[in-house]
Image: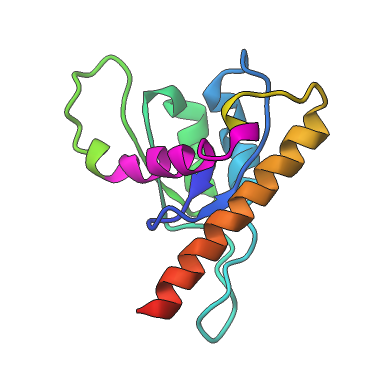
Amino acid sequence: MITDAGGVPLACLLSAANRNDVTQLIPLVEAIPPVHGRRGRPRQRPEALLGDRGYDSKAHRGQLRARGIRPRIAKRSTEHGSGLGGERWVVERTISWLHQHRRLRVRYERRADIHEAFLSIACSLICLKQLERIALC
């Protein structure tokens, strides 16, 4: 899952549990749709990408830079306290919002397409709640 700074899911991919996190980084970045809002051409990609040590790879950092994305990924084999934890908690909060939906907390479906449909519905509900919160302000 990749979110914006407010915790709104931008893209979410379903993969096997035994897949390494870093292998899903580039497909996840490519799955981000254009973000509309301001006048002019919509942004296609984020300016920076925050990630934990599971996404640390020299090759993937280079691929992100080639796409114009500044990688802010914690390096492996360094001591904790990199300062990124204060910003990465947004994704953890969004994952906890997804786990409020019973069908996503424990995977009951055997078919991946059904589970992915429930994941898309839950992400849509999270976006709707964020829009309602913004409209009330």
Based on the picture, tell me whether residue 100 belongs to the magenta stretch: yes
* Nearest to the observer: residue 95 or residue 132: 132
SS assignment for the magenta stretch, majority? helix
Say whether residue 4 is visible.
Answer: yes
Residue at 62% over, 17% down: 17
Give how far across and how far down residue 127 sits, in percent.
Answer: 55, 60
Instruction: Determine whether 58 is above or below 10 in the image.
Output: above
Question: On the rendered structure, is 28 left or right of 131?
Answer: right
Query: Where does the magenta region start and end?
Result: 87-103
Instruction: Determine whether 123 is above or below 62 in the image.
Output: below
* Nearest to the observer: residue 97 or residue 56: 97
* Nearest to the observer: residue 118 or residue 40: 118
Based on the picture, tell me whether residue 52 belongs to the magenta stretch: no
Give how far across and how far down residue 133 sits, in percent.
Answer: 42, 69
Residue at 56% over, 29% down: 105
Quadrant that contains the C terminus: bottom left
Question: On the rendered structure, is 112 left or right of 104?
Answer: right
Give how far across and how far down residue 93 sits, in percent.
Answer: 39, 42
* Nearest to the observer: residue 73 or residue 65: 73
Instruction: Determine whether 94 is above or below 41 in the image.
Output: above
Instruction: Determine whether 57 is above or below 30 in the image.
Output: above
Give how far across and how far down residue 109 sits, in percent.
Answer: 77, 25
Residue at 42% over, 26% down: 56
Residue at 43% over, 52% down: 7
Quadrant that contains the N terminus: top right
Q: Specify the quadrant of the image occupied by residue 27.
A: top right
